[in-house]
Amino acid sequence: MHYKRFILVYMYLMYMINKLLGAIVGAVIGQVVAKKEGAVLGALVGFAVGHFVDEIIDSG
């Protein structure tokens, strides 16, 4: 019975790690763009890149 809980916790942790990795990559690239092009464009690029990385990781 405990294996079901283990699987759920494992799946949740992997989901959160994927989201965190996408957010970190997006934030780093957003900061680089923000220094060169401005804060608004940096935020938009960071969000887009983070979402794209998250989708790539989720797809396998």
Image (cartoon, grey):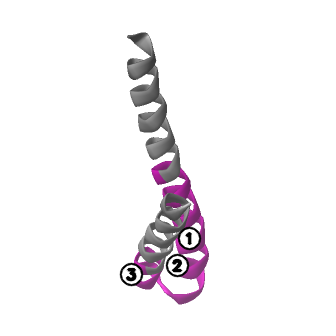
Image location (x, y in percent) of residue 3: 45, 17
Magenta-tinted stretch: 19-44
Residue at point 45% right, 27% down?
A: 7
The quarter of the rendered structure image containing the N terminus is top left
Q: Is residue 33 magenta?
A: yes
Residue indicated by mark 2:
34
Q: Alpha-carbon distance for marks 1 and 3?
A: 11 Å
Q: Earlier in the sequence, mark 2 or mark 3?
A: 2
Q: Amino acid at mark 3?
A: Val
Q: Secondary structure at mark 3?
A: helix
For residue 31, which numbered disc appears in the image? 1
Left or right of 9 on screen, residue 36: right
Residue at point 56% right, 70% down?
A: 31
Q: Alpha-carbon distance for marks 1 and 2?
A: 5 Å
- Local crowd size for mark 1, using a 10 Å CA cut-off: few (<14), some (14–19), many (≥20): some
Q: What is the chief secondary structure element of the magenta stretch?
A: helix
Residue at point 53% right, 89% down?
A: 37
Image location (x, y in percent) of residue 9: 43, 27
- Local crowd size for mark 3, using a 10 Å CA cut-off: few (<14), some (14–19), many (≥20): few
- Local crowd size for mark 2, using a 10 Å CA cut-off: few (<14), some (14–19), many (≥20): some
Please, which residue is most extreme toward the top here? Answer: 1
| Camera-nearest residue between 39 and 16 | 16
Residue indicated by mark 3:
40
Please, which residue is most extreme toward the front here? Answer: 1
Q: Secondary structure at mark 2?
A: helix
| Camera-nearest residue between 44 and 31 | 44
Q: Alpha-carbon distance for marks 2 and 3?
A: 7 Å
The quarter of the rendered structure image containing the C terminus is bottom right
